[in-house]
Amino acid sequence: MISSTSVLCPIDFSEGSQSALRYAGVIAAHFGARVTVLTVNDPLLTEAAELAGGGARLRDDTIREMERFCQQTLDGAPQPFRDLHFEVASGKPAPEILRVARQSGCDLIVMASHGSTGFRKLFFGSTTERVLRETTVPMLVTPSSDRGPAKFDDLKGTIRRVLVPVDLMGRTSDHQGIGQQVAKALTVPLLLLHIIEPVRAVPSPQAALSHVETAPRYRVEEALKQAVAAMPSPARCEALIAYGEPAEEIAKVANDRGAGLIVMGQQSSPAGGPRMGSVTYRVLCLAHSLVLTIPPIPHAVEQRQRRFEGQAVHD
């Protein structure tokens, strides 16, 4: 998906995990990357095993289970991995995923949006949201209903079009560039989407009409034309403006235009606060597409921080 030398794929032995693992395997094989497969055991299970003197055996049994799972999932893969490592952790899933991501120095996290239930219920809303909020590396979230590709060329048929929501304020340039690279690598069209949100409070209906339908639309059209014109030739790029709630419109456009991949950013606040990611998380709940999230690039965050501080001093 993006140039990568190390991919982290957390699994919980569900069908959703199989899909994520196939995506991780195809990406790793294409880029010659290392794959770290991670599972997180329930701490109560780990504690019980240690009290019974079987802590090491639990780890060995878990690794053997992971090996069987990977062999069954990746059977018939056309290209071997350069490296395949297994990691077993114990604790709360989201913090352990983030910890292993940091320690392994991974370049991409690939995980399913939902997984199994029971003592290994690794992927559900709060876990996915926590990882999305705090990850410092790109994260590819795969729909649980997607079986996953067998080879890299299958991604073209799955993705068909790359959708990049843009805000035209400079905060989306990073993931716009990555979306462009992915579309080019897969030789599929790129669709830039800008959402004009409804006005919550205006002095009068006339002011609402003027504000929503005249000036913003004109500025957005001009900005999108410039963005498309700036794309390197022969990039296939189109632009679209939609009105409404961002997450709902992004999911709708992705479905209507056959965009199998949505590339979105995880924005921090101007003051460097935590990333809320509410729109991104809502898109994950609504869309049936792959979602690649891009955390803020550190130097860009620092620049916005300095700009915010400078404005505060002048104010």
Image (tube, rainbow, N blue to C red):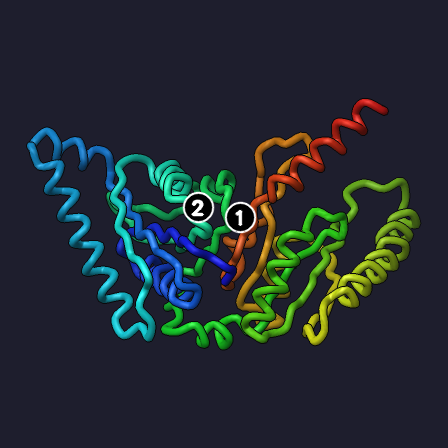
Q: Residue furthest left?
A: 52
Q: Is residue 157 left or right of residue 200?
A: left
Q: Determine crowd level at label 1: few under 14, some 14-19, many 20+ residues with C-alpha closer than 10 A.
A: some
Label 2, on which residue? 128
Is 158 positioned to the left or the right of 46 in the image? right
Where residue 302 appears, as percent x and y from the top left, is: 66, 35
Specify few, some or many for label 2: CA neighbours under 10 Å numbering under 14, 14-19, or 20 or more. Answer: many
Q: Quadrant of the C terminus?
A: top right
Q: Earlier in the sequence, mark 1 or mark 2?
A: 2
In the image, 95 versus 31, the foreground residue is 31
Q: Residue at x 40, y 63 (%)?
A: 32
- Label 1 sits on residue: 281
The residue under label 1 is which amino acid type? Tyr
Q: Residue at x 58, y 75 (%)?
A: 187
SS class of the residue under badge 2? helix
Residue 191 occupies quadrant: bottom right
Residue 238 vs 221, above or below: the answer is below
- Identify which residue is drawn at 53% across, 68% down: 260
> Does the residue at mark 1 contact the one at mark 2 (Cβ under 8 Å)?
yes
